Image (tube, rainbow, N blue to C red):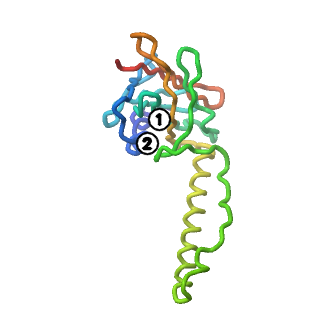
Amino acid sequence: MTVPVARLAACLLLALAASNGAQAAERRFMPIAASPAQRIDVVGTTPVVSANAASFGGGASVLPVSARSSRVLVSVRNLGTKPLAFDAAKVAVDSGGRVLALQAIDSQGHVVKQGKPQAGVPRSSGCLNVKQSAYSSCLEMESRRAELERATAASDASELGPILPGQTRASQYLVDLPRKSGDAPAAMKVTIRVSDEALGFEFREVQ
């Protein structure tokens, strides 16, 4: 079963749209098709490299953040008939054989803690000191806020669960960039491992 690469690239649009503006001292990395099986498409103004393994399809792109870090966007699509386990541990970035520090982040750039979301810390009601006439309205607002927090936790939990057959998941990470070595452009490799398969995507810095 094959999946058009464009569908993988389209999945990255959500993450691309949520990216922050780049800083003046940014460093840019462009994808390189390492084999005929890999394809590069442009989503908006961002090049995305993608390919298919037997059980999953993957795509990756790198967005500039600063002189020291970049945002790595990854897309994984389940091409098989069984759920695929996937989390931040399935993604790695290396440069010249050295593994680079990598952190999963959300669309706002906040670090995502892996594992089951923790229940909120019990807190006392903020309605204890309000006037009696406004007490019931205050309790209703607190109830709605609690429902929103539970819904958010449930959504976070689903993002950490397995990828079902036919589904695609996009995730993003903050990576510490490799140091420059003379005039030679720096290079990075993004590797996605799912089950016993792996897809590797190469990127080279634009001088």
Question: At 43% from the left edge and 39% from the top edge, which residue is drawn?
Answer: 12
The quarter holding residue 154 reads bottom right
Left or right for 101, reference 47 = right
Residue at which label 1 appears: 73
Side of 44 where 158 appears, left or right: right
| Residue 70 visible (yes or no) | yes
Q: Amino acid at mark 2?
A: Ala
Of residues 149 and 45, the one nearer the viewer is 149
Give residue 82's position: percent from left, percent from top: 64, 40
Residue type for callout 1: Leu
Residue situated in front as seen by the camera: 3 or 130:
130
Q: Earlier in the sequence, mark 1 or mark 2?
A: 2
Residue at x-position 65% and y-position 52%: 117
Q: Secondary structure at mark 1?
A: strand
Question: Does the CB distance between marks 1 and 2 fall below 8 Å?
Answer: yes
Residue 122 location, x and y as percent?
68, 65
169 vs 82, left or right, is: left
Residue on which the image places disc 2 = 15
Residue positioned 50% across, 31% down in the render: 58
Q: Is residue 120 left or right of residue 4?
A: right
